[in-house]
Image (cartoon, helix red, strand yellow):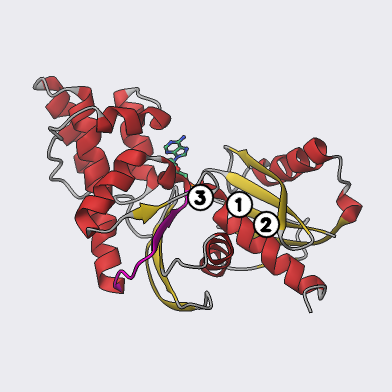
Protein backbone atom coordinates (compact mmCIF):
# COMPACT_ATOMS: atom_id res chain seq x y z
CA UNK A 1 0.00 0.00 0.00
CA UNK A 2 1.21 3.49 -0.86
CA UNK A 3 0.70 6.70 1.08
CA UNK A 4 2.06 10.12 0.25
CA UNK A 5 3.18 13.05 2.38
CA UNK A 6 3.64 16.45 0.81
CA UNK A 7 5.22 19.46 2.49
CA UNK A 8 4.52 22.70 0.65
CA UNK A 9 6.79 25.29 2.25
CA UNK A 10 7.64 28.94 1.66
CA UNK A 11 10.40 28.16 -0.85
CA UNK A 12 10.24 24.44 -1.68
CA UNK A 13 7.77 21.56 -2.06
CA UNK A 14 8.79 18.14 -0.84
CA UNK A 15 7.17 14.70 -1.31
CA UNK A 16 7.72 11.32 0.27
CA UNK A 17 6.04 8.23 -1.18
CA UNK A 18 5.83 5.52 1.45
CA UNK A 19 5.25 1.82 0.89
CA UNK A 20 3.37 -0.13 3.59
CA UNK A 21 3.95 2.62 6.14
CA UNK A 22 7.65 1.93 6.60
CA UNK A 23 9.63 1.98 3.36
CA UNK A 24 10.54 5.16 1.51
CA UNK A 25 9.76 4.29 -2.10
CA UNK A 26 10.67 7.70 -3.57
CA UNK A 27 11.20 11.33 -2.66
CA UNK A 28 11.15 14.57 -4.60
CA UNK A 29 11.97 18.22 -4.02
CA UNK A 30 10.95 21.12 -6.21
CA UNK A 31 12.26 24.63 -5.58
CA UNK A 32 8.81 26.24 -5.72
CA UNK A 33 6.65 26.61 -2.64
CA UNK A 34 3.33 28.10 -1.60
CA UNK A 35 1.42 29.98 -4.30
CA UNK A 36 3.05 28.04 -7.16
CA UNK A 37 2.39 24.72 -8.89
CA UNK A 38 5.35 23.27 -6.93
CA UNK A 39 3.08 20.89 -5.00
CA UNK A 40 1.58 19.19 -8.03
CA UNK A 41 4.94 19.08 -9.85
CA UNK A 42 6.53 17.51 -6.83
CA UNK A 43 3.81 14.86 -6.58
CA UNK A 44 3.95 14.09 -10.30
CA UNK A 45 7.71 13.65 -10.03
CA UNK A 46 7.46 10.81 -7.51
CA UNK A 47 4.65 9.19 -9.52
CA UNK A 48 6.68 9.35 -12.73
CA UNK A 49 9.92 8.04 -11.25
CA UNK A 50 8.16 5.08 -9.64
CA UNK A 51 5.43 4.37 -12.19
CA UNK A 52 2.91 4.41 -9.34
CA UNK A 53 -0.49 5.77 -10.38
CA UNK A 54 -2.38 8.43 -8.43
CA UNK A 55 -5.25 5.93 -7.88
CA UNK A 56 -2.82 3.55 -6.18
CA UNK A 57 -2.13 6.03 -3.37
CA UNK A 58 -4.44 5.20 -0.49
CA UNK A 59 -4.12 8.50 1.38
CA UNK A 60 -2.36 11.86 0.98
CA UNK A 61 -1.58 14.27 3.83
CA UNK A 62 -0.35 17.79 3.12
CA UNK A 63 1.68 19.90 5.53
CA UNK A 64 3.61 23.19 5.41
CA UNK A 65 2.43 26.75 4.76
CA UNK A 66 0.72 25.72 1.54
CA UNK A 67 -1.08 22.70 2.97
CA UNK A 68 -4.55 24.21 2.82
CA UNK A 69 -4.33 24.92 -0.90
CA UNK A 70 -3.40 21.47 -2.17
CA UNK A 71 -6.60 19.96 -3.53
CA UNK A 72 -5.07 16.49 -4.14
CA UNK A 73 -4.71 15.90 -0.40
CA UNK A 74 -7.16 13.85 1.66
CA UNK A 75 -6.19 15.78 4.79
CA UNK A 76 -3.73 18.23 6.25
CA UNK A 77 -1.66 18.46 9.42
CA UNK A 78 0.66 21.01 11.05
CA UNK A 79 4.37 21.03 10.32
CA UNK A 80 5.13 20.62 14.02
CA UNK A 81 3.30 17.29 14.19
CA UNK A 82 4.75 16.11 10.88
CA UNK A 83 8.37 17.02 11.69
CA UNK A 84 8.05 15.33 15.08
CA UNK A 85 6.58 12.21 13.46
CA UNK A 86 9.15 12.06 10.65
CA UNK A 87 12.19 12.59 12.86
CA UNK A 88 11.01 10.11 15.51
CA UNK A 89 10.56 7.48 12.80
CA UNK A 90 14.00 8.21 11.33
CA UNK A 91 15.77 8.32 14.68
CA UNK A 92 13.83 7.41 17.86
CA UNK A 93 16.69 8.62 20.09
CA UNK A 94 16.07 12.25 19.17
CA UNK A 95 14.66 14.47 21.93
CA UNK A 96 15.25 17.92 20.40
CA UNK A 97 14.56 18.93 16.80
CA UNK A 98 15.94 22.16 15.41
CA UNK A 99 14.01 22.84 12.22
CA UNK A 100 15.12 25.81 10.13
CA UNK A 101 13.18 26.33 6.93
CA UNK A 102 12.87 29.12 4.40
CA UNK A 103 10.58 31.25 6.49
CA UNK A 104 10.70 30.15 10.09
CA UNK A 105 12.67 28.30 12.73
CA UNK A 106 11.25 25.90 15.27
CA UNK A 107 12.71 24.05 18.21
CA UNK A 108 10.69 21.00 19.19
CA UNK A 109 11.17 18.77 22.24
CA UNK A 110 9.96 15.17 22.06
CA UNK A 111 9.56 12.47 24.67
CA UNK A 112 10.72 8.89 24.18
CA UNK A 113 7.45 8.03 22.40
CA UNK A 114 7.93 10.88 19.93
CA UNK A 115 5.16 12.95 21.51
CA UNK A 116 5.64 16.71 21.42
CA UNK A 117 6.56 18.01 24.89
CA UNK A 118 7.38 21.63 24.18
CA UNK A 119 8.21 23.90 21.27
CA UNK A 120 9.01 27.46 20.28
CA UNK A 121 8.85 29.04 16.89
CA UNK A 122 10.16 32.20 15.25
CA UNK A 123 8.00 33.07 12.28
CA UNK A 124 7.98 36.82 12.82
CA UNK A 125 11.49 37.78 11.82
CA UNK A 126 13.62 36.69 8.84
CA UNK A 127 16.81 36.68 10.93
CA UNK A 128 17.45 33.13 12.07
CA UNK A 129 15.73 31.58 9.04
CA UNK A 130 16.68 30.38 5.57
CA UNK A 131 15.35 33.66 4.22
CA UNK A 132 18.21 35.55 5.88
CA UNK A 133 20.74 33.18 4.30
CA UNK A 134 19.06 33.39 0.88
CA UNK A 135 19.04 37.21 0.93
CA UNK A 136 22.76 37.19 1.78
CA UNK A 137 23.50 34.59 -0.90
CA UNK A 138 21.92 36.91 -3.47
CA UNK A 139 23.95 39.93 -2.30
CA UNK A 140 27.19 37.96 -2.27
CA UNK A 141 26.34 36.11 -5.50
CA UNK A 142 27.41 32.85 -3.88
CA UNK A 143 25.04 29.86 -4.26
CA UNK A 144 23.55 28.79 -0.92
CA UNK A 145 24.92 25.25 -1.46
CA UNK A 146 28.46 26.70 -1.26
CA UNK A 147 28.00 28.45 2.09
CA UNK A 148 29.12 25.30 3.93
CA UNK A 149 32.52 25.07 2.23
CA UNK A 150 33.07 28.80 2.38
CA UNK A 151 32.21 29.04 6.09
CA UNK A 152 34.46 26.08 6.89
CA UNK A 153 37.39 27.55 4.98
CA UNK A 154 38.08 30.31 7.51
CA UNK A 155 38.86 30.63 11.21
CA UNK A 156 38.04 34.33 11.17
CA UNK A 157 34.30 34.85 10.88
CA UNK A 158 33.15 38.42 10.41
CA UNK A 159 30.99 39.80 13.18
CA UNK A 160 27.48 40.62 11.96
CA UNK A 161 26.01 42.72 14.73
CA UNK A 162 22.67 43.73 13.17
CA UNK A 163 19.85 41.43 14.14
CA UNK A 164 17.52 42.77 11.46
CA UNK A 165 17.90 41.33 7.94
CA UNK A 166 17.59 44.74 6.30
CA UNK A 167 20.33 46.29 8.47
CA UNK A 168 22.48 43.17 8.23
CA UNK A 169 22.26 43.48 4.45
CA UNK A 170 23.88 46.95 4.52
CA UNK A 171 26.36 45.77 7.15
CA UNK A 172 27.48 42.94 4.85
CA UNK A 173 27.83 45.32 1.92
CA UNK A 174 29.99 47.74 3.92
CA UNK A 175 32.13 44.88 5.28
CA UNK A 176 32.85 43.76 1.73
CA UNK A 177 33.59 47.35 0.74
CA UNK A 178 36.06 47.53 3.64
CA UNK A 179 37.93 44.50 2.33
CA UNK A 180 36.49 41.61 4.40
CA UNK A 181 36.90 38.31 2.62
CA UNK A 182 33.70 36.71 1.29
CA UNK A 183 34.30 33.48 3.22
CA UNK A 184 34.68 35.43 6.50
CA UNK A 185 31.43 37.26 5.83
CA UNK A 186 29.67 33.96 5.02
CA UNK A 187 30.97 32.37 8.22
CA UNK A 188 29.66 35.42 10.11
CA UNK A 189 26.26 35.09 8.44
CA UNK A 190 26.03 31.40 9.41
CA UNK A 191 27.02 32.29 12.99
CA UNK A 192 24.36 34.98 13.10
CA UNK A 193 21.58 32.53 12.10
CA UNK A 194 22.87 29.95 14.57
CA UNK A 195 23.01 32.43 17.42
CA UNK A 196 19.38 33.48 16.87
CA UNK A 197 18.17 29.88 16.75
CA UNK A 198 20.36 28.85 19.71
CA UNK A 199 18.54 31.52 21.75
CA UNK A 200 15.24 29.84 20.87
CA UNK A 201 16.66 26.39 21.66
CA UNK A 202 17.94 27.47 25.07
CA UNK A 203 14.48 28.76 25.97
CA UNK A 204 12.91 25.42 25.04
CA UNK A 205 15.68 23.47 26.79
CA UNK A 206 18.01 21.30 24.76
CA UNK A 207 17.98 17.59 25.52
CA UNK A 208 20.15 15.13 23.58
CA UNK A 209 20.01 13.62 21.01
CA UNK A 210 19.63 16.74 18.88
CA UNK A 211 18.62 16.53 15.22
CA UNK A 212 18.44 19.25 12.60
CA UNK A 213 15.61 19.16 10.06
CA UNK A 214 14.55 21.64 7.35
CA UNK A 215 16.53 22.89 4.38
CA UNK A 216 19.05 24.86 6.43
CA UNK A 217 20.25 21.54 7.90
CA UNK A 218 22.04 21.15 4.56
CA UNK A 219 24.23 24.11 5.49
CA UNK A 220 27.17 22.73 7.51
CA UNK A 221 28.23 26.29 8.35
CA UNK A 222 25.05 26.77 10.39
CA UNK A 223 25.23 23.25 11.86
CA UNK A 224 28.82 23.79 13.05
CA UNK A 225 27.93 27.16 14.57
CA UNK A 226 24.91 25.70 16.38
CA UNK A 227 27.06 22.90 17.80
CA UNK A 228 29.50 25.49 19.15
CA UNK A 229 26.71 27.67 20.59
CA UNK A 230 24.81 24.82 22.22
CA UNK A 231 27.81 22.62 23.06
CA UNK A 232 26.11 19.49 21.74
CA UNK A 233 26.62 17.40 18.65
CA UNK A 234 23.87 17.78 16.11
CA UNK A 235 22.69 14.94 13.91
CA UNK A 236 21.30 15.43 10.44
CA UNK A 237 20.65 13.25 7.43
CA UNK A 238 20.39 13.53 3.68
CA UNK A 239 16.63 13.40 4.32
CA UNK A 240 16.63 16.33 6.81
CA UNK A 241 14.71 18.61 4.43
CA UNK A 242 12.12 15.85 3.86
CA UNK A 243 11.19 15.16 7.49
CA UNK A 244 7.88 17.05 7.33
CA UNK A 245 6.83 15.17 4.19
CA UNK A 246 7.94 11.87 5.75
CA UNK A 247 5.86 12.56 8.86
CA UNK A 248 2.87 13.44 6.69
CA UNK A 249 3.24 10.15 4.76
CA UNK A 250 3.39 8.22 8.07
CA UNK A 251 0.23 9.96 9.34
CA UNK A 252 -1.41 9.18 5.99
CA UNK A 253 -0.65 5.49 6.54
CA UNK A 254 -2.25 5.65 10.00
CA UNK A 255 -5.33 7.26 8.44
CA UNK A 256 -5.86 4.24 6.17
CA UNK A 257 -6.37 2.07 9.25
CA UNK A 258 -3.85 -0.48 7.94
CA UNK A 259 -1.48 0.19 10.87
CA UNK A 260 -3.83 -1.53 13.36
P1 LIG B 1 10.39 25.72 3.35
O1 LIG B 1 9.77 24.43 3.84
O2 LIG B 1 9.96 26.92 4.14
O3 LIG B 1 10.20 25.91 1.88
P2 LIG B 1 12.94 24.35 3.53
O4 LIG B 1 12.88 23.53 4.79
O5 LIG B 1 12.78 23.63 2.25
O6 LIG B 1 11.94 25.59 3.63
O7 LIG B 1 14.33 25.14 3.56
C1 LIG B 1 14.63 26.10 2.60
C2 LIG B 1 15.97 26.71 2.97
O8 LIG B 1 16.98 25.70 2.88
C3 LIG B 1 16.41 27.80 2.01
O9 LIG B 1 15.96 29.04 2.50
C4 LIG B 1 17.94 27.66 2.01
O10 LIG B 1 18.55 28.61 2.87
C5 LIG B 1 18.23 26.27 2.54
N1 LIG B 1 18.84 25.39 1.53
C6 LIG B 1 18.21 24.80 0.50
N2 LIG B 1 19.08 24.07 -0.24
C7 LIG B 1 20.28 24.19 0.35
C8 LIG B 1 21.60 23.67 0.06
N3 LIG B 1 21.83 22.87 -0.97
N4 LIG B 1 22.60 24.01 0.90
C9 LIG B 1 22.38 24.82 1.94
N5 LIG B 1 21.18 25.33 2.27
C10 LIG B 1 20.14 25.03 1.49
Residue drawn where x is 44% and y is 47% of the image: 102
Q: Are marks 3 and 1 in contact (CB under 8 Å)?
A: no
- Residue 189 place in picture, x, y as percent: 24, 39
The earlier-in-sequence mark between 2 and 1 is 1
- Residue 79 place in picture, x, y as percent: 54, 63
Give the quarter of the image for residue 218.
top left
The earlier-in-sequence mark between 3 and 1 is 1
> Residue at label 1?
8
Residue 221 is tagged as none
Q: Is residue 131 magenta?
A: no
Tell me which secondary structure the magenta stretch mostly adopts: loop
Secondary structure under tag 2 reads: helix
Q: CA distance from mark 3 to mark 1?
A: 15 Å
> Can residue 68 be seen from the camera position used here?
no
28 displayed left or right of 81:
right
Q: Residues within 10 Å of mark 1 (few under 14, many from 20)?
A: many
Rendered view: 229 above or below 167: below
Disc 1 beta carbon < 8 A from ligand 1?
yes
The segment highlighted magenta reads: 205-214
- Residue 254 place in picture, x, y as percent: 74, 72
Amino acid sequence: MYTLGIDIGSTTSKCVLLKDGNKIKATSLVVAGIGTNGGIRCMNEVLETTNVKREEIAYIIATGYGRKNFSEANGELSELSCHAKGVHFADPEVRTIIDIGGQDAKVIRLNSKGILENFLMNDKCAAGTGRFLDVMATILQVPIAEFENQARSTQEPAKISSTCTVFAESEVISQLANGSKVECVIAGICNSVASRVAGLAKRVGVKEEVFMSGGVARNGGVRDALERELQVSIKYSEHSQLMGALGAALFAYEKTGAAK
